[in-house]
Amino acid sequence: MKIKNIRLIVILIMISFFGFSQENSSETKQKGHLNLNKFRQMYQEFSSPNMFRTAAGAPGPAYYQQQADYKMDIELDDKNKRISGSETITYTNNSPDNLEYLWVQLDQNVRKKDSPSLERDGSGVRPFYPPSGFTNEFLTDPFDGGFNVEYVKDEDGKTLSYFINQTMMRVDLPKVLKSGEMFSFSMKWWYNIQDHVNQDGRSGYETFESDGNRSYIIAQFFPRMAVYNEIEGWQNYQFWGNGEFALPFGNYEVKITVPADHILDATGELQNRKEVFSKDMLKRYNKAKKSYDKPIMIVTQSEAEETEKSFSNNKKTWHFKAQNVRDFAFATSRKFIWDMMAVKIGNRDVMAVSLYPKEGNPLWEDYSTIAVAETLKTYSDYTFDYPYHKAISVHAKQIGMEYPMICFNFGRPNIDGSYSDDVKFGMIGVIIHEVGHNFFPMIVNNDERQWAWMDEGINTFVQYLTEQKLGKDYPEIIYPNENYPSDRGPAELITNYMSVDQNFLAPIMTNPENVYSLGPNAYGKPATALNILRETIMGKELFDHAFKTYSKRWMFKHPTPEDFFRTMEDASAVDLDWFWRGWFYTTDYVDIGIKEVKQYYVSPGPGKEMRKIMEERGIPMNRLRPMIYFEDFENDTENLKDGNPLENSKLLNNYLNENYSEEEISNLKVPKYFYEVIFDKPGGLVMPIIVEYEYEDGTKEKIKYPVQVWRKNDNEVSKLIKSNKKIINITLDPDLETADIDTSNNSWPKKQEDSDFDKFKKRIKG
Amino acid sequence: MKKISLLILLFIIYGFGHKYYVSTSLYDFKEDLGSLQITIRVFKDDFTEIIKKKYQIDLSLNKDLNSNEIKSKISDYLLSNLGIYLDNNKHEIFYLGSEEKNEMLIFYLELESIPSFKSIELKNTILFDLFEKQQNIIHLKKGLNKRSFILRKDAPNVSFEF
C-alpha cells in the first residue's frame, strides 16, 4: 500500500473521532437505559425452563397432570326446570406434591342470589324503566340459582369437611393425599336451570311459546375438579362470567334420566342404544354410519313435530361413557330433529351429528352437519386426527359454546323460513368455531380462566382456514362470493381495533376478566397475528409444520402460552421473540411509511455532502484519493443528473478499461437510476418491509426486506435501490399483509386518500 | 394528515354466546371545511329491529337503504335520537345516507357551515329504546384533540370543552 494512503487513512480515523466528539458537545447528560431493543430474546418475560416444560416448548421429563374420573346419575325435571344429581369423583394425584385439600368448581354459583358477580360491573339509577324491567329489578325475587349441595362424603360414606367460597369449594382431606395416590368422594346436589334466552349463561333452557316445549342445553351442571399444576398450584380463580374453564382430563360414566319422549345426545359413547332408540332409529343410524356424502335423518321434522304434542310422563335413562375428556355436556328436548353423517378421518370413521328443533330449518338441515364434517377434516389436517368418535352441533338461540364432542350454536331463520346471508354465514362460522374447539381447548387443554386467547385466538385462526377451505369445497354455499366472507383472519380486518384509543386497549396477554373488548382482544387479534405469521413472516410450510408440532406435543396435555411460543420457534428456526412480544405483550400497532425518496447520480467530482465533510475535516482536494461520487439530484448545478455512471465518471471508465475486456464491459449492466428510499415507522411494532417498485415501462417488482432491518434503528431505515429503469411508484405493503393501520403514508409519490366519509359523500352526490 | 380510525368494531363473542349492544359514533370536526362529519356504526340486526318496531319496515328485505322511503325513516329515527349543541346552540343535522358492511350499518351525517366552537354537547340515544344494555361509544376529533366517552341509557349526554 502506498505511504500516502496510510497517512490519509490515519488522518481520517483521527479526524473522525475528533469530529464526532465535537458534534456531541451538548449541555444535558444523557441517561443510560436497559436493553429495550425490540429483537431482544424473551428471557425476562418467560419462566425459566425446567423439568416440567422444556425450553423447546415440549412437556419435560417431570411433566405431570392430574386425573379426575366421574360416575354420575343425573335427572332432569322438565316440569320444574331442575337438575338433580349424584356423583363419585376419583381424583388421582400424579403430582410430586402432597395435597391437604382439593378444590371443586361450582360454576352454577355464579347465579346464586347473593353472588358478587352480579355486582361486578358498574350501574346507576335510571330515570325511567319499562314495566318488565322494573318488575324484574325491583318486584320479583332474584333468580334462585346456584348449587344446593346435599352432601359431600368420602368413599366410606363419612361426611367430609368442606367450605364454599362463591364458585369454588374446598374439600378438606381427612388425611394428606400423597403423590401418586387416589382419593374418591361423592356429592349430591340440585339446582334450578335458568332461561338462557332471557337471563345470561352458556347453558340453560329455551321455552317455545308456540308449542309449550322447552329445549335444554346443559353444561357446568355438576361439581367438578379444579386444575392443580406447577404453574398456579390450584387454579381456583373465581368464575365471574368472562374467564372460561380450566379442567383436568378423566374418564366419565354418566346416566341421564329425562322424559321418555326426549331426544338426547351428550359427550361420550351411548351404551344402551337399543333401550333408547326405536327400531326405525336404529335402522337409520346404521345407514348413517355408512353415509359419507350426505346426512341421514335419525329423527325427521314431521316425527319431531308429532312428539312436540306428547308430553310423556314416563322416563328414560341414557347411559354414556367417555374416555379422556375434560368436561361433559348434553342437550335434550322432545322437539329435536336428529341427523348424522360419517366422516373419514385418517383410518377411522367419525360421526358428524346435528340436533335442532324445527325452528332451525331449513338452514340447519342444509348446512349444520356439512359444516361439522368440514371442520373435523380441516382441523385434522392442520393438527392431528380427531381422536373422538363423534362431534355434535346443537341448535341454541344466541349461544356459541363448546364442550367435548358437543357444542351449542346459534343461527335461526325467520318464522317463514327465510334467512339473510348474515344469518347463514353467522351460523356456519359459529359451528366451525365451536366444533373446532374440540381441538383447542378440549384436547390441547389450556387454562382458559387465565388465558382466553390461547384457545379462542388459536381456534379462530384455524376457523378462518376452515372457512376458506369450505368456500373452495362448496362454492355453491358461498355463491355469489368468490371466497368465504370471513370476518376475522385477514390482516386488514384488525386495523380498526388496533388503532383505537389506547385507553380501551389491553395486550392479548391479559386475564379475560380485565379486558374491554374481549372479542377483538382474545379472538380477532391473536387469530390475525397467527395468520400474518403463516402468510408473511414464516411462510405456510414452516408455519404448518411448527403448528402441527405444537398440537401433537400437547394433545391431551395442558400447555401454557410459553409452550406455544417456544415450540413455534424451536421447530422452524425463525426467531419470533420480537413478534410474540410486540403482538401479544403490548398494544403497539403497525404503521410503516415512506418518509422520503431521494434520487442520486454519479458525478465526476465530490458532491455537496462530500465537500461538506472535507471542509469540516480540513481535507483539501488534492489529498483525496480518486473515488466515484454520488450526488443528490437536488444539488445538480451542471445538469449532470441525466448522465449514466459511465458518462459522468472518467475514473470509472478508466478502471473498467484497465480491468475488463471489451466484451465483458459490453455485457455489464450499468444502472442509471439510484434511489435512496427512507422508511420510517410511526407505529411501535416492527414488521418486514414489503415494497413494490413500479417502473416506467409498467413492470413491477416486489421485495421483502426482513424485519431485522429495524434492529439497529427502530425509527428509520434507508435502502439504496439501483435500477436500469426509472421508478415511478413505490408502494408499501401492496397486499395489505402487515395490518398497517394507516396506509396514507404507504405511497411515493404520496397518494391523496379520501376518508370513508368523503368517499361516501362523493358517491351519493354522483 | 394521518388518517387515524378511532372506531371500535365489537364482534359477537362466540365463546360466550353473548352479544354486546354497542354502537360507535365518530364526530370529526373539519376546521378547514367548517363542517362536523358524523359516522355512526350499528349492528344491522339491532337497527333492523327498531325500524321494524317503529315504522313497520323490514330493512333486511329491502336492498336499497337510500331509497326515498327508507331514507326518510332512517333520517327520522337518527335525527330524533341525536342532538348536537355547539357553545349551547342547537344545530341541525343532515342525514346523507347509509351503507352496509359485514354485519354493520354505517350512517353518514353532517353539520355544515359551522364556526369553530369552544364547547360541544352531544346527545346520542340510538337503540336505547330497544335495549337496556345499549352503549353508544362516542369519539370526538377536533384538530389534535381526541375525546372518547360511553353513553348509556341512564346518561345519554356528554359535554366537552376545548
Image: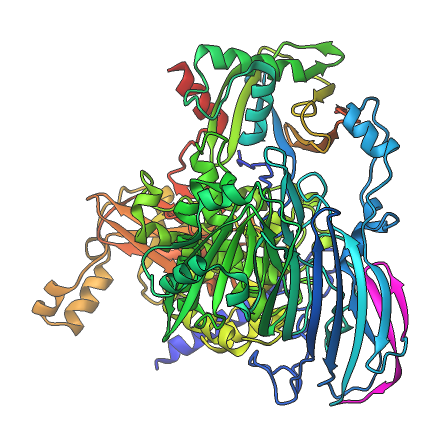
Above or below A407: residue A388: below
Q: Is residue A171 magenta?
A: yes
Q: Position of residue A519 (x, y in %)?
A: 61, 48
Question: At x 75% / y 74%, what residue is drawn?
Answer: A88
In the rendered image, the quadrant that contains the C terminus of chain A is: top left
Q: Is residue A686 visible?
A: no
Residue at 30% x, 61% y is A628
Residue A423: percent from the left, percent from the top? 48, 38
Number of marks:
0
Range of residues picked out in magenta: A160-179
Asked which colour scheme the image uses, the reply is rainbow
What residue lies at 34% left-to-right and 55% top-to-bottom? Answer: A294
Q: Residue furthest left?
A: A663
The location of residue A677, given as percent across then percent down, is: 40, 51
Instruction: Please state which of residues A101 and A500 is positioned toward the viewer in this rendering.
Output: A101
Depth check: A747 or A471 in front?
A471
Is the N terminus of chain A in the top left, top right, bottom left or bottom right quadrant?
bottom left
In this rendered view, identify the residue nearer to me: A260 or A166.
A260
Residue A336 in the figure: left or right of residue A473: right
Residue A390 visible to an observer of this rendering: yes
Residue A445: x and y in percent read: 60, 70
In the displayed structure, A399 sits above or below A59; it is: above
